[in-house]
Image: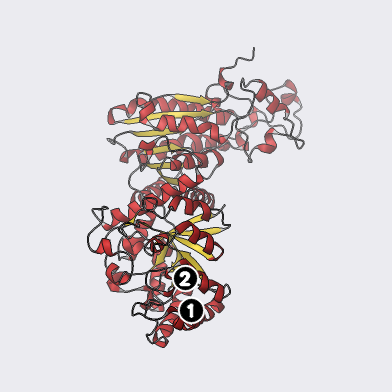
Amino acid sequence: MAKFLISAFADEASPNIREQIAACKANGITHIELRALDGGKTINNITPDEAREVKAALDEGGIGVSAIGSAYGKIEITDDFEPHFEAFKNTVEVAKILGTKNIRLFSFYFTKGESYEEYRGEVLRRLEAFCDYAAPFGIRCCHENEVGIYGDIPERCLDLHKALGGKLGGIFDPANYVHTNADILPAYEMLEPYIDYMHVKDARFSDGVVTPAGEGDSNYTELLRRFDKKDGERFLTIEPHLTIFEGLAQLEAHGGSKALLAGKTPFHYASRAEAFAAAANALHKQIRLVRGDKVMQHKNLCGRVAVITGAGGVLCSGFAKDLAAQGAKVAILDLNLAAAQAVAADVLSDGGVALAVQCNVLEPESLAAARETINAAFGTCDILVNGAGGNSPLGTTTKETLELSDIAEKAEGVKTFFDLDPKGIEFVFNLNFLGTLLTTQCFAKDMVGKQNACILNVSSMNAFRPLTKIPAYSAAKAAVSNFTQFMAVHFADVGIRVNAIAPGFFATNQNHKLLFNEDGSLTPRSDKIISHTPLRRFGTPDDLTGALLFLCDETYSAFITGVVLPVDGGFSAYSGV
């Protein structure tokens, strides 16, 4: 299965690079294929110094460059090649500065009746010159099919790839093939070995109208399903062409957007940003259809902004993926940025919209900075999941009960109730309770008066019945449950529902050694847990999905607030007899 990386021609959202970055972040896009910039500049003619300025802005915004969306090869085959090639050399330097390994190009226009057979050798010579110059710099030239060029139909694209012996990468643009009346799925199978990445653009055979992915005649869902069989990271680059933008007429001088340029399209958007978002949403939908991980049953969660703390961890990362699968835009907050980024990458690869944000829930300044970042990218919070929490050995005893010998002659390594470190107790209370309070203070301000806003806290079945050995954690989670009920009442008049999930014992990679012996058998403590769990098993992260979506979706839980819902296999209900 491929790891999809989402890119876009963000100049269709705005010519301004910072607005392009903002549009990408708002729509779950991690990379840009750079084509046009402020002041009518194109990527073909920016200087290295200008490229460094663009790179600084991209780095600041956390957006990568998937490819240089150049127009090389978009001249007539009979035009002078040397000035074109000299400009290309500068673009290779620009590509190095921008940190991309790909330059998109074309195979020259044949719009004046030139013979394909007569000029085939010249096309190959020119393309090979591009490839040979770029290769020593670690840059791959990738050919895009386009109406009017030599490589307009699948058969001639295949000819180019075979003749150049693997030097030339391939970009599959389904809409452009529709505009040549090609049979799309056979075209994909013909070219599959040579395809590096794919454009996200669809079109109709009947009138040539460009559509969001999946709404045209390219069989986009099936194309994506087949592309998903390739290994490694694979870019899907959104090229909307859904509304007229500066430079479209020049880009499509010989292309297939005549219906759009003539105003003959059924797709109408209030702004370029809205058209860009529509194209991005269509791709996210297509990926979810192809991956089919979870059916979107909670459609009214689609488009909502969900902020999840502790989302780099096992359980809360599952929350992020579950909400993203329903179309929510998820902000993944964690103290460990690398962990948050890994979760965000998984969400994005599966067609979701996600943003990784480093955040310390015990520092109001860090929370405020996270809120500002999220509001700028997604808008204000609709769903807040307070998942950050944990325990500390400093707040834990080594034995389940105190024995007289522990006072008189305490064995080495034994830590009793009387040895508990106040700093450890404070840390556990701060992380679980204070982290919930401070996060809610920060984000709930934006939720006041919003329709269907909700807060979901993560408590524990420890809150119902404290476990032995972990008094600090049990008491802190009891505080979270109590605080949940307080907030449910406090926020009721301003429209915010507040509930909590109380997970039981969940087997994860993180706690596997604590629950199981090396031979896979239960440890003595695990044996006690299972014997007191009526369903006779540990939970898995997927066991929390139903509770999460039920409590977040007002269709099912609009009259539920102040509830602490156990998801523990019956552990909290069992008396032991």
Residue at 41% from the left image edge and 81% from the top image edge: 115
> Which quarter of the image is occupied by the C terminus?
top right
Query: In the rendered structure, which disc, 1 or 2, sits on the residue that comes first in sequence?
Result: 1
Residue at 34% from the left image edge and 61% from the top image edge: 20
* Residue to which mark 2 is pinned: 143
Q: Which mark is residue 127?
A: 1
The part of the image, by quadrant, that contains residue 6 is bottom left
Q: Which mark is residue 196?
A: none
Nearest the viewer among 284 and 428 is 284
Q: Is residue 105 above or below residue 490?
A: below
Q: Is residue 25 above or below residue 456?
A: below
Residue 143 locus on image (x, y percent): 47, 71
Which amino acid is tagged 2? His
Nearest the viewer among 475 and 22 is 22
Give the alpha-carbon distance from disc 1 to disc 2, as whole Å: 9 Å
- Element under disc 2: strand
Nearest the viewer among 23 and 57 is 23
Which amino acid is tagged 1? Leu
